[in-house]
Image (spheres, coloured by chain):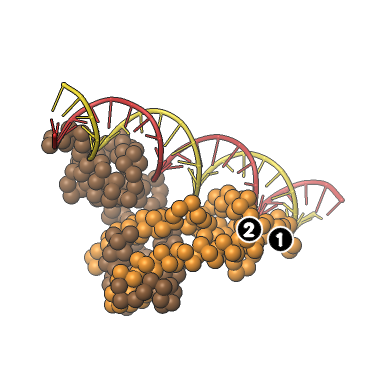
Chain colours: A brown, B orange, C red, D yellow
Amino acid sequence: MSLPPTDPRLLALAQSFRTTLRHAVYLSRSMDGDGEITSMQMSTLSMVAEEPLRVSRVAANLGIRVPSATEQIIKLEQAGLVSRQPDPTDSRAVLVKLTDKGRAEWEDAGRRRNERVAALLAHLDDNDRALLAAALPVIGKLSRTA
Amino acid sequence: MSLPPTDPRLLALAQSFRTTLRHAVYLSRSMDGDGEITSMQMSTLSMVAEEPLRVSRVAANLGIRVPSATEQIIKLEQAGLVSRQPDPTDSRAVLVKLTDKGRAEWEDAGRRRNERVAALLAHLDDNDRALLAAALPVIGKLSRTA
DNA sequence: GACTCATGATTAGGCACCCTAACATTCGTC
DNA sequence: GACGAATGTTAGGGTGCCTAATCATGAGTC
Protein backbone atom coordinates (compact mmCIF):
# COMPACT_ATOMS: atom_id res chain seq x y z
CA MET A 1 0.00 0.00 0.00
CA SER A 2 3.03 2.20 0.27
CA LEU A 3 3.01 3.01 -3.45
CA PRO A 4 0.29 4.18 -5.82
CA PRO A 5 -0.65 1.41 -8.29
CA THR A 6 0.63 3.46 -11.20
CA ASP A 7 4.13 3.97 -9.83
CA PRO A 8 6.60 3.16 -12.61
CA ARG A 9 8.59 0.87 -10.34
CA LEU A 10 5.45 -1.08 -9.57
CA LEU A 11 4.58 -1.40 -13.24
CA ALA A 12 8.06 -2.61 -14.05
CA LEU A 13 7.85 -5.23 -11.34
CA ALA A 14 4.43 -6.21 -12.61
CA GLN A 15 5.83 -6.70 -16.08
CA SER A 16 8.59 -9.01 -15.03
CA PHE A 17 6.31 -10.80 -12.60
CA ARG A 18 3.90 -11.56 -15.42
CA THR A 19 6.64 -12.89 -17.63
CA THR A 20 8.07 -15.04 -14.89
CA LEU A 21 4.64 -16.32 -14.00
CA ARG A 22 4.11 -17.41 -17.56
CA HIS A 23 7.34 -19.34 -17.58
CA ALA A 24 6.43 -20.87 -14.26
CA VAL A 25 3.20 -22.12 -15.75
CA TYR A 26 5.13 -24.02 -18.40
CA LEU A 27 7.54 -25.26 -15.78
CA SER A 28 4.64 -26.51 -13.75
CA ARG A 29 3.10 -28.21 -16.75
CA SER A 30 6.37 -29.88 -17.69
CA MET A 31 6.49 -31.40 -14.25
CA ASP A 32 3.46 -33.63 -14.47
CA GLY A 33 4.74 -36.35 -16.63
CA ASP A 34 4.38 -39.86 -17.71
CA GLY A 35 0.77 -40.82 -17.30
CA GLU A 36 0.69 -40.39 -13.57
CA ILE A 37 -1.63 -38.24 -11.51
CA THR A 38 -2.03 -34.78 -12.97
CA SER A 39 -1.03 -31.61 -11.19
CA MET A 40 -4.68 -30.77 -10.85
CA GLN A 41 -5.50 -34.08 -9.22
CA MET A 42 -2.50 -33.75 -6.92
CA SER A 43 -3.89 -30.47 -5.70
CA THR A 44 -7.25 -32.00 -4.93
CA LEU A 45 -5.73 -34.94 -3.13
CA SER A 46 -3.48 -32.67 -1.07
CA MET A 47 -6.50 -30.76 -0.01
CA VAL A 48 -8.55 -33.67 1.25
CA ALA A 49 -5.50 -35.38 2.70
CA GLU A 50 -5.77 -33.33 5.87
CA GLU A 51 -9.51 -33.66 6.34
CA PRO A 52 -12.60 -34.49 4.27
CA LEU A 53 -13.90 -31.42 2.46
CA ARG A 54 -17.10 -30.42 0.75
CA VAL A 55 -17.15 -30.19 -3.01
CA SER A 56 -17.74 -26.47 -2.79
CA ARG A 57 -14.69 -26.05 -0.57
CA VAL A 58 -12.53 -28.01 -2.98
CA ALA A 59 -13.76 -25.85 -5.85
CA ALA A 60 -13.08 -22.66 -3.94
CA ASN A 61 -9.60 -23.79 -2.96
CA LEU A 62 -8.81 -24.72 -6.53
CA GLY A 63 -10.21 -21.47 -7.85
CA ILE A 64 -12.66 -23.25 -10.14
CA ARG A 65 -16.44 -23.63 -10.30
CA VAL A 66 -18.34 -26.31 -8.47
CA PRO A 67 -19.31 -28.32 -11.57
CA SER A 68 -15.67 -28.45 -12.64
CA ALA A 69 -14.68 -29.70 -9.23
CA THR A 70 -17.42 -32.32 -9.31
CA GLU A 71 -16.01 -33.54 -12.61
CA GLN A 72 -12.51 -33.92 -11.23
CA ILE A 73 -13.70 -35.55 -8.06
CA ILE A 74 -15.76 -38.09 -9.95
CA LYS A 75 -12.67 -39.06 -11.91
CA LEU A 76 -10.69 -39.47 -8.74
CA GLU A 77 -13.51 -41.53 -7.30
CA GLN A 78 -13.55 -43.79 -10.34
CA ALA A 79 -9.82 -44.24 -9.90
CA GLY A 80 -10.52 -45.28 -6.32
CA LEU A 81 -8.50 -42.42 -4.84
CA VAL A 82 -11.29 -40.60 -3.03
CA SER A 83 -14.74 -41.46 -1.77
CA ARG A 84 -17.86 -39.32 -1.65
CA GLN A 85 -20.19 -39.46 1.31
CA PRO A 86 -23.07 -37.25 2.31
CA ASP A 87 -22.16 -34.82 5.05
CA PRO A 88 -23.84 -36.12 8.24
CA THR A 89 -24.56 -32.57 9.34
CA ASP A 90 -26.13 -31.49 6.04
CA SER A 91 -27.40 -34.02 3.54
CA ARG A 92 -27.18 -31.56 0.68
CA ALA A 93 -23.42 -31.47 1.02
CA VAL A 94 -20.96 -34.12 -0.08
CA LEU A 95 -17.76 -34.86 1.78
CA VAL A 96 -14.75 -35.83 -0.30
CA LYS A 97 -12.46 -38.16 1.59
CA LEU A 98 -9.10 -39.65 0.71
CA THR A 99 -9.08 -43.46 0.48
CA ASP A 100 -6.15 -45.54 1.65
CA LYS A 101 -5.19 -46.17 -1.93
CA GLY A 102 -5.53 -42.44 -2.61
CA ARG A 103 -3.25 -41.58 0.26
CA ALA A 104 -0.65 -44.06 -0.88
CA GLU A 105 -0.64 -42.83 -4.47
CA TRP A 106 -0.70 -39.22 -3.38
CA GLU A 107 2.34 -39.73 -1.20
CA ASP A 108 4.18 -41.62 -3.92
CA ALA A 109 3.42 -39.09 -6.60
CA GLY A 110 4.29 -36.21 -4.29
CA ARG A 111 7.60 -37.82 -3.50
CA ARG A 112 8.44 -38.32 -7.16
CA ARG A 113 7.50 -34.76 -7.96
CA ASN A 114 9.54 -33.38 -5.12
CA GLU A 115 12.53 -35.32 -6.31
CA ARG A 116 12.09 -33.99 -9.80
CA VAL A 117 11.89 -30.42 -8.56
CA ALA A 118 14.71 -30.95 -6.12
CA ALA A 119 16.87 -32.03 -9.03
CA LEU A 120 16.17 -28.67 -10.62
CA LEU A 121 16.81 -26.77 -7.42
CA ALA A 122 20.10 -28.58 -7.01
CA HIS A 123 21.42 -26.58 -9.94
CA LEU A 124 21.00 -23.35 -8.02
CA ASP A 125 23.61 -22.00 -5.66
CA ASP A 126 22.85 -21.43 -2.00
CA ASN A 127 22.20 -17.75 -2.48
CA ASP A 128 19.62 -18.29 -5.21
CA ARG A 129 17.91 -20.93 -3.14
CA ALA A 130 17.71 -18.54 -0.23
CA LEU A 131 16.20 -15.86 -2.46
CA LEU A 132 13.65 -18.34 -3.76
CA ALA A 133 12.71 -19.60 -0.32
CA ALA A 134 12.21 -16.05 0.91
CA ALA A 135 9.95 -15.09 -1.96
CA LEU A 136 7.62 -18.09 -1.96
CA PRO A 137 5.50 -16.79 0.93
CA VAL A 138 5.18 -13.48 -0.86
CA ILE A 139 3.86 -15.13 -4.02
CA GLY A 140 1.50 -17.16 -1.88
CA LYS A 141 0.25 -13.96 -0.33
CA LEU A 142 -0.36 -12.47 -3.77
CA SER A 143 -2.27 -15.52 -4.95
CA ARG A 144 -4.50 -15.38 -1.95
CA THR A 145 -5.17 -11.68 -2.48
CA ALA A 146 -6.35 -12.19 -6.05
CA MET B 1 24.96 -28.39 -7.47
CA SER B 2 26.15 -27.72 -3.96
CA LEU B 3 23.62 -30.16 -2.52
CA PRO B 4 22.62 -33.71 -3.46
CA PRO B 5 19.13 -33.80 -4.98
CA THR B 6 17.82 -35.86 -2.10
CA ASP B 7 18.88 -33.44 0.63
CA PRO B 8 15.91 -32.96 2.97
CA ARG B 9 16.21 -29.18 2.78
CA LEU B 10 16.02 -29.38 -0.98
CA LEU B 11 12.97 -31.62 -0.86
CA ALA B 12 11.25 -29.29 1.56
CA LEU B 13 11.92 -26.33 -0.69
CA ALA B 14 10.68 -28.35 -3.65
CA GLN B 15 7.47 -29.07 -1.81
CA SER B 16 6.67 -25.47 -1.05
CA PHE B 17 7.81 -24.39 -4.48
CA ARG B 18 5.36 -26.79 -6.09
CA THR B 19 2.52 -25.55 -3.95
CA THR B 20 3.29 -21.94 -4.65
CA LEU B 21 3.61 -22.65 -8.33
CA ARG B 22 0.17 -24.17 -8.37
CA HIS B 23 -1.31 -21.11 -6.74
CA ALA B 24 0.56 -18.94 -9.19
CA VAL B 25 -1.04 -20.82 -12.06
CA TYR B 26 -4.47 -19.93 -10.76
CA LEU B 27 -3.33 -16.36 -10.19
CA SER B 28 -2.13 -16.19 -13.74
CA ARG B 29 -5.37 -17.61 -15.03
CA SER B 30 -7.42 -15.16 -13.03
CA MET B 31 -5.55 -12.33 -14.64
CA ASP B 32 -6.75 -12.79 -18.17
CA GLY B 33 -10.14 -11.34 -17.87
CA ASP B 34 -13.06 -9.99 -19.68
CA GLY B 35 -12.94 -11.30 -23.19
CA GLU B 36 -9.69 -9.71 -24.11
CA ILE B 37 -6.52 -11.34 -25.40
CA THR B 38 -5.64 -14.45 -23.42
CA SER B 39 -2.44 -14.88 -21.50
CA MET B 40 -1.35 -17.43 -24.05
CA GLN B 41 -1.91 -15.08 -26.95
CA MET B 42 -0.12 -12.29 -25.11
CA SER B 43 2.92 -14.51 -24.84
CA THR B 44 2.90 -15.22 -28.54
CA LEU B 45 2.51 -11.58 -29.45
CA SER B 46 5.34 -10.58 -27.10
CA MET B 47 7.54 -13.05 -28.83
CA VAL B 48 7.00 -11.87 -32.36
CA ALA B 49 6.95 -8.23 -31.28
CA GLU B 50 10.73 -8.08 -31.43
CA GLU B 51 11.18 -9.92 -34.69
CA PRO B 52 9.26 -12.33 -36.92
CA LEU B 53 9.68 -15.93 -35.78
CA ARG B 54 9.09 -19.34 -37.24
CA VAL B 55 6.21 -21.40 -35.99
CA SER B 56 8.62 -23.94 -34.57
CA ARG B 57 10.41 -21.22 -32.61
CA VAL B 58 7.18 -19.91 -31.21
CA ALA B 59 6.21 -23.42 -30.14
CA ALA B 60 9.56 -24.01 -28.49
CA ASN B 61 9.46 -20.70 -26.65
CA LEU B 62 5.97 -21.42 -25.42
CA GLY B 63 6.89 -24.92 -24.39
CA ILE B 64 4.18 -26.48 -26.54
CA ARG B 65 4.13 -28.64 -29.68
CA VAL B 66 4.18 -27.23 -33.15
CA PRO B 67 0.58 -28.15 -34.05
CA SER B 68 -0.67 -26.40 -30.92
CA ALA B 69 1.29 -23.30 -31.86
CA THR B 70 -0.08 -23.40 -35.39
CA GLU B 71 -3.56 -23.48 -33.95
CA GLN B 72 -2.97 -20.42 -31.79
CA ILE B 73 -1.25 -18.55 -34.56
CA ILE B 74 -4.09 -19.18 -36.97
CA LYS B 75 -6.49 -17.69 -34.46
CA LEU B 76 -4.30 -14.64 -34.05
CA GLU B 77 -4.13 -14.35 -37.82
CA GLN B 78 -7.90 -14.51 -38.12
CA ALA B 79 -8.09 -11.75 -35.54
CA GLY B 80 -5.73 -9.72 -37.72
CA LEU B 81 -3.04 -9.53 -35.07
CA VAL B 82 -0.28 -11.42 -36.87
CA SER B 83 0.48 -12.37 -40.45
CA ARG B 84 2.03 -15.54 -41.79
CA GLN B 85 4.52 -15.42 -44.63
CA PRO B 86 6.84 -18.06 -46.05
CA ASP B 87 10.41 -17.60 -44.91
CA PRO B 88 12.35 -16.23 -47.92
CA THR B 89 15.38 -18.29 -46.95
CA ASP B 90 13.43 -21.57 -46.64
CA SER B 91 10.01 -21.96 -48.17
CA ARG B 92 9.08 -24.78 -45.88
CA ALA B 93 9.19 -22.43 -42.92
CA VAL B 94 6.57 -19.84 -42.02
CA LEU B 95 7.42 -16.51 -40.45
CA VAL B 96 4.95 -15.12 -37.94
CA LYS B 97 4.95 -11.34 -37.92
CA LEU B 98 3.12 -8.81 -35.77
CA THR B 99 0.71 -6.58 -37.68
CA ASP B 100 0.21 -2.92 -36.81
CA LYS B 101 -3.12 -3.77 -35.28
CA GLY B 102 -1.47 -6.61 -33.40
CA ARG B 103 1.18 -4.31 -32.00
CA ALA B 104 -1.40 -1.78 -30.88
CA GLU B 105 -3.58 -4.34 -29.15
CA TRP B 106 -0.60 -6.06 -27.62
CA GLU B 107 0.61 -2.82 -26.10
CA ASP B 108 -2.83 -1.92 -24.83
CA ALA B 109 -3.49 -5.30 -23.30
CA GLY B 110 -0.01 -5.39 -21.76
CA ARG B 111 -0.61 -2.04 -20.17
CA ARG B 112 -3.94 -3.11 -18.72
CA ARG B 113 -2.45 -6.30 -17.37
CA ASN B 114 0.44 -4.51 -15.80
CA GLU B 115 -1.94 -2.15 -14.10
CA ARG B 116 -3.97 -5.04 -12.78
CA VAL B 117 -0.88 -6.77 -11.41
CA ALA B 118 0.50 -3.53 -10.08
CA ALA B 119 -2.69 -3.10 -8.10
CA LEU B 120 -1.99 -6.46 -6.47
CA LEU B 121 1.62 -5.61 -5.83
CA ALA B 122 0.58 -2.35 -4.23
CA HIS B 123 -0.79 -4.36 -1.34
CA LEU B 124 2.68 -5.64 -0.48
CA ASP B 125 5.08 -3.75 1.71
CA ASP B 126 8.46 -2.62 0.43
CA ASN B 127 10.26 -5.54 1.98
CA ASP B 128 8.02 -8.13 0.34
CA ARG B 129 8.34 -6.39 -2.99
CA ALA B 130 12.11 -6.48 -2.69
CA LEU B 131 12.02 -10.20 -1.90
CA LEU B 132 9.81 -10.81 -4.90
CA ALA B 133 11.96 -8.77 -7.25
CA ALA B 134 15.06 -10.61 -6.12
CA ALA B 135 13.53 -14.03 -6.68
CA LEU B 136 12.04 -13.51 -10.12
CA PRO B 137 15.34 -14.03 -11.93
CA VAL B 138 15.87 -17.23 -9.98
CA ILE B 139 12.52 -18.60 -11.05
CA GLY B 140 13.30 -17.61 -14.61
CA LYS B 141 16.54 -19.52 -14.36
CA LEU B 142 14.70 -22.60 -13.13
CA SER B 143 12.19 -22.44 -15.93
CA ARG B 144 14.92 -22.24 -18.48
CA THR B 145 16.71 -25.22 -16.95
CA ALA B 146 13.68 -27.45 -17.20
C1' DG C 1 17.95 -35.14 -62.83
C1' DA C 2 15.87 -38.79 -59.78
C1' DC C 3 15.86 -41.08 -55.20
C1' DT C 4 16.01 -40.78 -50.54
C1' DC C 5 15.99 -38.86 -46.18
C1' DA C 6 15.34 -35.01 -43.07
C1' DT C 7 12.83 -30.88 -41.76
C1' DG C 8 8.83 -27.44 -41.23
C1' DA C 9 4.21 -26.98 -41.04
C1' DT C 10 -0.60 -28.38 -41.27
C1' DT C 11 -4.64 -31.43 -40.78
C1' DA C 12 -7.35 -34.90 -38.31
C1' DG C 13 -8.90 -36.92 -34.26
C1' DG C 14 -8.99 -37.13 -29.40
C1' DC C 15 -8.44 -35.87 -24.42
C1' DA C 16 -8.37 -32.77 -20.22
C1' DC C 17 -10.20 -29.04 -18.02
C1' DC C 18 -12.97 -25.18 -17.61
C1' DC C 19 -17.42 -22.63 -18.09
C1' DT C 20 -22.76 -21.35 -17.83
C1' DA C 21 -27.50 -22.83 -17.50
C1' DA C 22 -30.87 -25.83 -15.93
C1' DC C 23 -32.28 -29.17 -12.59
C1' DA C 24 -32.95 -31.91 -8.16
C1' DT C 25 -32.56 -32.11 -3.36
C1' DT C 26 -32.19 -30.43 1.24
C1' DC C 27 -32.06 -26.65 4.73
C1' DG C 28 -33.98 -22.77 7.31
C1' DT C 29 -37.45 -19.81 8.14
C1' DC C 30 -41.96 -17.85 8.30
C1' DG D 1 -46.16 -26.83 5.12
C1' DA D 2 -44.53 -23.47 1.79
C1' DC D 3 -40.87 -20.45 -0.02
C1' DG D 4 -36.27 -18.86 -0.90
C1' DA D 5 -31.41 -20.06 -0.29
C1' DA D 6 -27.74 -23.28 -0.54
C1' DT D 7 -25.35 -27.66 -2.40
C1' DG D 8 -24.40 -30.75 -6.02
C1' DT D 9 -25.08 -32.88 -10.40
C1' DT D 10 -26.21 -33.08 -15.34
C1' DA D 11 -26.14 -31.23 -19.98
C1' DG D 12 -23.92 -28.84 -23.47
C1' DG D 13 -20.20 -26.07 -25.20
C1' DG D 14 -15.51 -23.93 -25.74
C1' DT D 15 -10.41 -23.80 -25.51
C1' DG D 16 -5.96 -25.56 -25.49
C1' DC D 17 -2.93 -29.25 -25.70
C1' DC D 18 -1.45 -33.79 -27.52
C1' DT D 19 -0.04 -37.69 -31.07
C1' DA D 20 -0.23 -39.58 -35.65
C1' DA D 21 -0.59 -38.91 -40.35
C1' DT D 22 0.11 -36.02 -44.35
C1' DC D 23 2.02 -32.51 -47.49
C1' DA D 24 5.74 -29.72 -49.19
C1' DT D 25 10.35 -28.28 -49.45
C1' DG D 26 15.40 -28.72 -48.72
C1' DA D 27 19.77 -31.31 -48.97
C1' DG D 28 22.65 -35.08 -49.99
C1' DT D 29 23.78 -39.04 -53.18
C1' DC D 30 24.18 -41.61 -57.32
Residue D1 in the image: above or below residue D17: above
User: Mark 2 sits on what residue?
Assistant: B82
Q: Is residue B116 left or right of residue D24?
A: left
User: Disc 2 marks which amino acid?
Assistant: Val
Residue A50 in the image: above or below residue A20: above
Q: In the rendered structure, which disc, 1 or 2, sits on the residue that comes first in sequence? A: 2
Residue B87 circle label? 1
Give me the residue at 20% from left, 48% from top. Answer: A49
The answer to whether any part of residue A101 appears in the image is no
Output the chain of dot 1.
Answer: B
Mark 1 vs mark 2, foreground winner is: 2
Q: Is residue A20 left or right of residue B126?
A: right
Same chain? Circles 1 and 2: yes
Give me the residue at 29% from left, 60% from top. Answer: A144
Give percent across and percent down for residue A63: 32, 50
Output the chain of dot 2.
Answer: B
Residue A146 in the image: above or below residue A134: above
